[in-house]
Image (cartoon, rainbow, N blue to C red):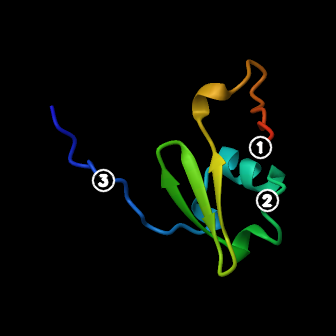
Amino acid sequence: MSQSRSSVSTERLHWKDLSLQELEHVLKSEEVTGEPEDYEYIRQDGTLHVLNDECSIEISVSPAKEQPDGSTPVEPKG
């Protein structure tokens, strides 16, 4: 069975379109400076692409890593 969405949507989202989990990842990321409304977002294969005029940041938001208590650990990068 082929999926009609073989290519991932590149629709740009605003911070209000993000799930609470995605927004939490954005707020906890050391790479994201400024306010969430200063960025645009693209969801792609478990990654949230965070964009503004100056940079593009990729944040992993894989839902499979949620802990039993409901928290989601943020993995350090680098």
For the point 80% across and 56% down, the residue is 27
How far apart marks 2 and 1 lie (CA) works out to 10 Å
- The reply to whether the C-beta atoms of the residues labelled 3 and 2 are less than 8 Å apart is no
- Using residue 21 as the reference point, say whether residue 29 is left or right of it: right
Indicate which disc residue 31 carries: 2
- Please state which of residues 38 and 20 is positioned toward the viewer in this rendering: 38
Residue occupying image coordinates x 79% and y 59%: 31
What amino acid is found at the position of numbered circle 2 in the picture?
Glu
SS for tag 2?
Answer: loop
User: Is there a contact, CB below 8 Å, between mark 2 and mark 1?
Assistant: yes
Task: Give the quadrant of the C terminus.
Answer: top right
Taking the view exactly as shown, the residue that stands out farthest to the left is 1
Q: Position of residue 44 (x, y in %)?
A: 47, 51
Q: Nearer the viewer, mark 3 or mark 1?
A: 1
Q: Quadrant of residue 64?
A: top right
User: Which quadrant of the view contains residue 10?
Assistant: bottom left
Residue 53 position, x and y percent, is 65, 81
User: Regarding mark 1 in the picture, which secondary structure is present there?
Assistant: loop
What residue is shown with label 1?
Answer: 77
Q: Residue 33: where, in percent of width, then height?
A: 82, 68
